[in-house]
Image (cartoon, grey):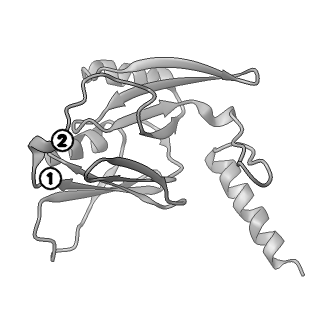
Amino acid sequence: MLSLIGVGIWRLYIGAGEKLTKSGIGGDMDGRGEKVEESTDFYENILGFVPVRRPVSFKFDGSWLFGHGIGIHLLQSEDPESFPKKTVINPKDNHISFQCESMNMVEKKLTEMGINYVRQRVEAGGIYVDQLFFHDPDGFMIEICNCDDLPIIPLAGEMIRSCSRINMRMIQQQKIHVRVQP
């Protein structure tokens, strides 16, 4: 199991086509796949998610997992053949991103598990970020990065210092203090 820092900011809807939308911290990822058991093992053993109980009233196959501040809902597709098979790893495809503490450990784990990946390095303002891109068993793209030092700059408003867990807590506490002040 890898040590990841999940920010939990994406909800992935899969239906007629792919659409990645921002959901807010504590969101969940909902994927309609064809390999529920294989995908459950992948998210549990590769990314460290924990399977959790689903409502017993659900009369369809699926799996719920939780970890790193987000939930993942894997649902058995009614028509698995309609899913496009993704074999090429394209870092420009829609994807969910997680931070990690050790890129070398992630790369070693992916190699040991026989999972194909693409390594990339980007530079922004003198800060270098390493990225690993790979697919889950259903073809959904995942990025693992060491992007903690990369400042997150909203399109409007003040700058967020970085996306680390510690800085997110500090920012949230500052917002609470701002609200309390007259």
Name the outermost residue toward the bottom: 182
- Left or right: 10 with respect to 161? left
Q: Position of residue 131 (x, y in %)?
A: 51, 25
Q: Amino acid at mark 2?
A: Phe
- Left or right: 148 with respect to 177? left
Which one is nearer the viewer's eye here, 50 or 180? 180
Q: Is residue 171 above or below residue 84?
A: below
Q: Is residue 21 above or below residue 57?
A: above
Quarter of the image for the C terminus: give it: bottom right
Alpha carbons under labels 2 and 1: distance apart: 9 Å
Residue, disc 1: 77
How many numbered marks does the figure carry?
2
Which one is nearer the viewer's eye here, 148 or 122? 122
Viewer can see residue 135: yes
Kindly identify the residue that appears in the image at 66 percent across and 21 percent down: 123
Q: Position of residue 168 (x, y in %)?
A: 66, 53
Which one is nearer the viewer's eye here, 154 or 166? 154
Q: Give the number of the mark in front: 2 or 1.
A: 2
Graded by Cα atoms within 10 Å as few (under 14), some (14 to 19) or many (20 or more), the crowding at tag 2 reads some
- Left or right: 80 with respect to 181? left
Quarter of the image for the N terminus: give it: top left
Q: Position of residue 61 (x, y in %)?
A: 12, 59
